[in-house]
Amino acid sequence: SEGVTAVKKLGDYFDKISGTINDCNIYILEGEEPGATMLVLGGSHPEEPAGRLATWIMAENGIISQGRLILALSTNRSATTVTRPSGAYPRDYSIQTPWGERTFRMGDRWTNPLDQWPDPEVYIHYPSRQNLAYVDVRNLNRAWPGRSNGTLTEQTTFAFMELIRQEKVDVVIDLHEAELQYPVINTIVAHEKGLELATMVSMMLTDFEGFSIGTEFSPKNLHGLSHREIGDHSEGISLLVEAPEPFLDATRGITDRKQLLEGKDDFVVKAGKHGLLYAPIDENGWPIDVRVGRHLSTILQTFESWNEMYPGNEIVCQGVPRYAEVIENGTGYYLKDPGKATEGKVAYE
C-alpha cells in the first residue's frame, strides 16, 4: 500500500532477534496528524490463516490519515516454515484474485522444532513459573511477555514487548482462529484495561455488521497469553480476537486446502448436532471470506470505538474493507498484484 510509510524489522527493537528466522517485517502506516498507535498481530499461529490474511489486506490497502498503525503479518515467522507433525496439513494454500493466484504458506501453531529444540518435559512459564504443556514452550501465545535470554519464542515475544514499549502502543490486537469445540470462540478476549473498549466493539458489531461476537475477561491466573501479559507488562490495552476454523477441530474430516478455505466439514456438523460445539455450523461452513471479514470489521470497529472513548488521541484508517465488502467481493479482491506495485513498494515477507 502507498500508506506504508516505513518497513522495519523486529530486530530493530531487540538485537538478539536480528538475522534470525523470526526477524519479521514490521509495517508502519503513519498519518500526517498525530494520534493513537495501534499494533495488529497476524500469524501468531500461522495455521490460523484468517488473521494473517487480514493483516496482509491492511498492509496492502490501508491509509492512515491520523495516528499510527503497526502491522506484523508473520508474528511467528518460524512457525510458517513447518506444518503440524501427523496433521496431514497442506504445505500452502492459494487465494484467487482478479489477476491470478496468491499462494501463502500454511504453517503450524508452534515454532519450528528445527529452530528451537528440545522441548522440556514440563514448560515453566516466565515470569509466573506456571506449569504448562511441554509443547507450548514453542507456542508464541504462551510465551508472553518473553525474556531477553530465553528461547527463540521467548525472545520473539520479548522483542514485541520492546516494540510495544518503544513505540508507545495504545492497543494491541492479536488475531486468532479456533476449533468450534473450543469454548473461547467468536469472541474478543480483553485485558481488564480494555474491557470497556471490547464491550463497545462487540455491541456495535453485533448490532450493525451482521455477525455476533462476544466479550470475555482475560483470566488473571492463566499466563503466557497476549491478552494477559501485554496488558500486565506495558501501558497498552491487549485484545485477542477469535474466529471459527473447522479445519482445526479434532472431529474434522480431510485436512486439505478445500476444507481450510471453505470451512465445510460434515463431521464437524454432526458434532454440532450432538451438542459438542461452542459455535454454530451448517452446510455453509465457515469460509475464509467470512473469517477474514470478521477480523477486519473487528479491527476497524476497535479504531472507531477507541476514537469515541478517547477524543483527541484518535486513529483514522481508510481503504480497508469491512465484513460485508469481503463477503461480496472475496478476500482475493483486496490482494494486490506485486507485478504492478510502485518501485520500492514490494517487501519480501
Image: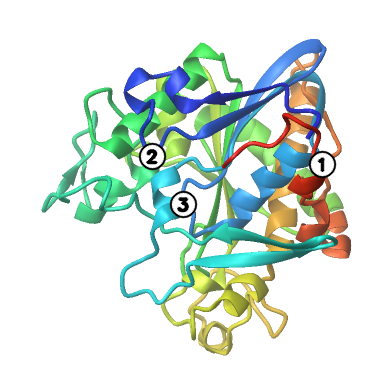
Q: Which mark is residue 153?
A: none
Give the amino acid at mark 3. Answer: His
Marked residue nearer the N-terminal end (2 or 1):
2
Badge 3 element: loop
Q: Position of residue 100 (x, y in %)?
A: 78, 64
Quarter of the image that includes the C terminus: top right
Marked residue nearer the N-terminal end (3 or 2):
2
For marks 1 and 3, give the CA distance: 23 Å
Rendered residue at 60%/49% (across/down): 52
Quarter of the figure with residue 64: top right
Question: In the rendered view, how is the structure colored?
Answer: rainbow
Graded by Cα atoms within 10 Å as few (under 14), some (14 to 19) or many (20 or more), the crowding at tag 1 reads: many
Q: Is residue 81 above or below residue 169?
A: below
Q: Position of residue 141 (x, y in %)?
A: 40, 44
Q: Position of residue 62 (x, y in %)?
A: 79, 35
Left/right of residue 34 with respect to residue 213 in the rendered view: right
Of circles 3 and 2, the one toward us is 2
Rendered residue at 38%/59% (across/down): 82
Residue bearing the label numbered 3: 45
Q: Position of residue 75 (x, y in %)?
A: 49, 40
Rendered residue at 36%/66% (across/down): 84
Q: Please name whichever residue, 132 or 38, is drawn nearer the observer in this view of the structure.
A: 38
Give the amino acid at mark 2. Answer: Ile
Residue bearing the label numbered 1: 320
Quarter of the figure with residue 346: top right
Badge 2 element: loop
Left/right of residue 78 with respect to residue 206 in the rendered view: left
Q: Please name whichever residue, 217 or 253, is drawn nearer the observer in this view of the structure.
A: 253
Q: Is residue 92 above or below residue 120?
A: below
Q: Please name whichever residue, 91 or 158, is drawn nearer the observer in this view of the structure.
A: 91
Rendered residue at 27%/22% (across/down): 148
